Amino acid sequence: MNVRYSETRSPQFTISHFKKGGKSQRHSRSGFVKVLRWSARCHIVQRRSFHGRFFLRWKFGSFSVTPLLLAICTLSSLPLSFTFLPFLSFSSRLWFSEERSSKAMFDRSGSMRDRLQDTLFAHRNELVSLLSRYVAQGKGILQSHHLIEELMKSVKEDERMQKLRDSPFVQFLQSAQEAIVMPPFVALAIRPRPGVWEYIRVNVYELSVDNLTVAEYLQFKEELVDGQSHASYVLELDFEPFNATFPRPTRSSSIGNGVQFLNRHLSSAMFRNKESLEPLLGFLRTHKHDGRGMMLNDRIQNISRLQSALTRAEEHLSKLPPNTSYSEFEFDLQGMGFERGWGDTAVRVSETMHLLLEILHAPDPSTLETFLGRIPMVFSVVIVSPHGYFGQANVLGLPDTGGQVVYILDQVRALENEMLLRIQKQGLDVIPKILIVTRLIPDAKGTTCNQRLERVSGTEHTHILRVPFRTETGILRKWISRFDVWPYLETFAEDVSNEIAAELQGVPDLIVGNYSDGNLVATLLSCKLGITQCNIAHALEKTKYPDSDIYWRKYEDKYHFSSQFTADLIAMNNADFIITSTYQEIAGSKNNVGQYESHTAFTLPGLYRVVHGIDVFDPKFNIVSPGADMCIYFPYSEKEKRLTALHGSIEELLYNPEQNEEHVGMLSDRSKPIIFSMARLDKVKNLTGLVECYGKCSMLREIANLVVVGGYIDVKNSRDREEMVEIEKMHGLIKQYNLHGQFRWINAQMNRARNGELYRYIADTKGVFVQPAFYEAFGLTVVEAMTSGLPTFATCHGGPAEIIEHGISGFHVDPYDPDQLTTILVDFFESCQKDPSYWFKISDGGLKRIYESYTWKIYSERLLTLAGVYGFWKHVSKLERRETRRYLEMFYTLKFLDLAKSIPLAVD
């Protein structure tokens, strides 16, 4: 064992000593050294805490281990790896550390720190004045907009502060995502560009500026909650060492283009070193389906034999008519070393073989991706989505049931079509299978959610497979919130494994998780079955609820975020590839942090500290945008396809004066255009925020009516905690602003065909669609509205900011700035009154945008290509890294399971 001792001062303790609370103590060597013996390398580092205290921290790899755990190992004289960490690889490192000052520890020159020091030199009085204003607010977290607002207030109060306002310091302040104020300190999290972070601490009294490590910044942040911590041991998570040698891009613009980067990396390696082609040969030779070999047989043993065989096969195929069926020359190719999978006709086989020859001679990224996309690799797919009511009818608008269900149903229809097309072109006689795995709910509330197996309409080979949540006392019969599912998922995954084995008569080729719960189940299944895993987050809760990490205890009883954030970390680090609908979902924008980026570094005080959770530059991230079902959602102008038979029931919904459980409020003036919105009725979707904006703006109320669709009308019908609050709020707003005659509230609508026609009916009134969410990961209703030709106004926070080109294909609105939202709407309607063609201009711009980038055909092609590329990459790079997997298993076993068990089980 290589034992190394390093520190900035002279040694003060030996290997059998350690320092705790500033006192040197001797430890029994017998069991202690046994622990060390299991580590290949021992690294002892001395560090001082943020406030000068010493404490001991043990780390395995970068996984800090509590002293109690090591103490028990020591006292029992058992090796740590056998006692508590059965999954710990021998390559892990054991670190003993004492915290030392940030200045000595982090002495690299930081550009942001330099900028702040330059400002301190050039505008000393002004900067001190601004920082003093921050400190005067006392302990707390200041968000980016608070920092800017305080600067603007200071400029109004003192004209000398204009110098600071006009200096480059403003750019620095705009890149600050938050500030932790602990007088006399102000610690800043600086984000110069997406995915890149620096941490700085300013002592306002001494005018000193220091760089901080991630851990030091998070420790400072924790003290807001716990005060000056006296705990000696903090569990830290750091996944970075496992990926230190892994290739990844460095430019923020490359984030989300992982497959392009991998193809460039692979082709470059093949070009530089021909030995890098051997894994490709091995991959083609071992490729099988149901035990039957594909692509190559044993006649081809090396690269030179492969090249000569490809040349001979090409020459043979060139003599055949292009459309000659594969069966007519199958025996000839078998003799040369080739099996089925190259194509269905002579011309298709020849094209595929030519691609491989080009790779062998001069590999390039485009050719490699095209070839890998043609290899038959995916014949069965499992899609996992446990929570909510997953069904094909009468479920939309029920608790936890909305866009994700629509997304998956549209996804599998497109996916089956693409799989059938590819299999046919590959010359294979294989029937694809797709299973959507969800929860079986015995008390199904008039839906099919109590049926075990249900074929998806519009498909031949895709089914919904429902498996119940089970405990020791039996099957859970009723719906439960997505925030309460965590205690059930491990047993659910075991049951699902058995069910899919029975349905598929084998293991799937690809598993796709959805949302946090589905991604965790997909992780458990992929580890057990050894299959490629894809994650789709849809919406990570951490960005929806500001400060839900630092103040997690405040949310725990209601949302159980400690379990969810832990599950998210495990799933996103285990996935082979992750697809998102937009760039913003990964890395946000210039001013907003992305969903995944928010998991880079955070802390749950008292539980653990994440110093490196996920790297948004990881090439596992890929942007694959979905579309809308073109059979349901199509432009209002396609008159021959319009469902005019539904217009009577739509007019009943909109204008019937009767007040009942389906609709309340009424529209007195039917000549006005309609402002329309449709979403789940929860806090984040912000439907009540839109109603309040409308109620406050008399000008907007004169120009247009408002119609919202979402939730229940009667609070007694809801069982969702957030929805119940929003229902009460909606009724209060109707009374407060006296909206009768201008506003209609319709309960959640289950009929997708009628919803599609409702969009088009609103377009007939020359109305608009508004999506006012505080955050929206993608925005499926935005795509649906734009596909219907309805001018769309959508939140600037999240995916819609990428879908819409402001002023061209729609408009961005800020739900945090109600005046901006109403101003944009009023300006639009006034512009349309002056020039009616303006409405058509925005409508046409939206349609053009959809056809260019947001269709399910594009999506399904891309998903299957990604599955091929990452399946190959996993094979050639030995991506099943044992160290990472064991690290995650340890985290799952020691942390997640205890957190999940602490959640009370539901009672039927």
Image (cartoon, helix red, strand yellow):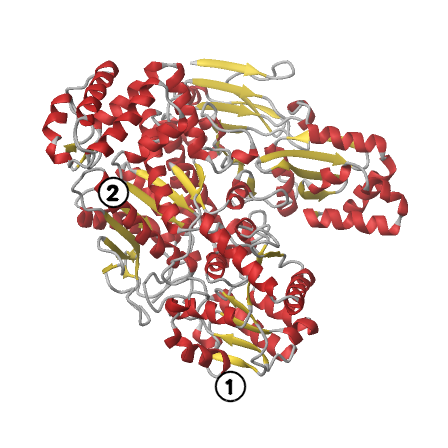
How many badges with numbers are in the image?
2
On screen, 492 above or below 770? Answer: above
Residue 88 visible in this rendered orientation of the protein: no
**What's the mark number on residue 236?**
none
Up the image or down, 517 lies above or below 108; here it is below
Secondary structure, mark 2, is: loop
**Residue drawn 60% across and 66% down?**
690
Residue 881: percent from the left, percent from the top?
36, 28
Q: Badge 2: how crowded within 10 Å, few (<14), some, or many (20+)?
A: many
> Which residue is the site of mark 1?
657
Q: Residue at x 49, y 46 (%)?
A: 582
Would you say 611 lies left or right of 436 here? right
For the N terminus, the image quarter is top left
Which amino acid type is shown beneath numbered disc 2? Pro
> How many residues crowd mark 1 within 10 Å: few (<14), some (14–19), many (20+)?
some
Which of labels 1 and 2 is toward the front? 1
Of helix, strand and loop, which one carries label 1? loop
Q: CA distance from mark 1 to mark 2?
A: 53 Å
Q: Is residue 69 left or right of residue 283?
A: right
Residue located at (34% from left, 40% from top):
533
Q: Nearer the viewer, residue 427 or 382?
A: 427
> Residue 508, which numbered label?
2
Tell me the amino acid under the disc marked 1. Pro
Task: Return the x and y of residue 205 as percentages of the image width and height.
Answer: 82, 36
State whether residue 652 is above or below residue 296. Answer: below
User: For this view, does 300 lie left or right of residue 772?
Assistant: left
Name the quarter where the C terminus is drawn.
bottom left
Residue 890, percent across and down?
39, 36
| Front one among 822 and 55 | 822
- First in residue order: circle 1 vs circle 2: 2
